[in-house]
Image: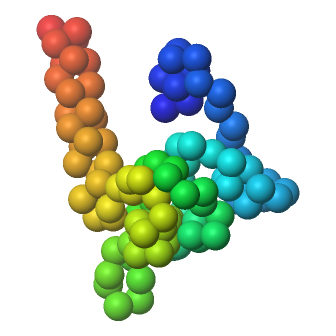
């Protein structure tokens, strides 16, 4: 995703769970792709109004419910768009995996 964005001349900042002052960085981002592996890590107060949130995280709670790395309910009131979990980028990931598998299989034969 980073390479795709850079290819379109976007300015890309990469953060991780140990990034200092991560809230300051996320508050200024137009697009946030969150894949940190912590349920509801990204909070509404970390997101600027109108931002686009792409939640790649999948977390299963003790009650079996699946949620993402972004606080969906609160952020959805603030962001211009947020992908749901489940049902957001997961199906696209599976589709691209299968597409790559078919491509690889054709190259073997």
Q: Nearer the viewer, residue 8 or 39?
A: 8
Q: Is residue 109 left or right of residue 82?
A: left
Residue 16 at least partly seen: no
Q: In the current view of this chain or complex, which residue is farthest to the right? A: 20
Vertical side of 40 occupied by 91: above or below: above
**Residue under the image location 55 percent in, 57 percent down:** 49
**Residue under the image location 74 percent in, 50 percent down:** 25
Q: In the current view of this chain or complex, which residue is farthest to the bottom? A: 63
Task: Report x, y in % for residue 28.
Answer: 68, 48
**Residue under the image location 67 percent in, 53 percent down:** 26
Q: In the current view of this chain or complex, which residue is farthest to the front? A: 49
Task: Report x, y in % for residue 64.
Answer: 32, 84
Vertical side of 92 occupied by 7: above or below: above
Task: Report x, y in % for residue 2.
Answer: 56, 30
Q: Is residue 12 left or right of residue 107?
A: right
User: Dividing the image into 4 quarters, which one contains the C terminus?
Assistant: top left
Q: Is residue 72 left or right of residue 43?
A: left
**Residue under the image location 17 percent in, 23 percent down:** 102
């Amino acid at each position: 995703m980073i390479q795709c964005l850079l290819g379109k001349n976007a300015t890309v900042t990469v953060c991780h769970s140990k990034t200092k002052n991560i809230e300051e960085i996320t508050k200024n981002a137009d697009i946030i792709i969150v894949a940190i592996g912590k349920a509801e890590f990204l909070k509404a107060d970390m997101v600027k109004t109108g931002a686009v949130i792409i939640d790649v995280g999948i977390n299963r709670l003790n009650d079996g419910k699946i949620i993402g790395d972004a606080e969906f309910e609160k952020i959805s009131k603030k962001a211009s768009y947020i992908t749901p979990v489940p049902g957001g980028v997961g199906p696209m990931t599976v589709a691209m995996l299968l597409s790559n598998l078919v491509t690889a299989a054709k190259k073997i034969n």
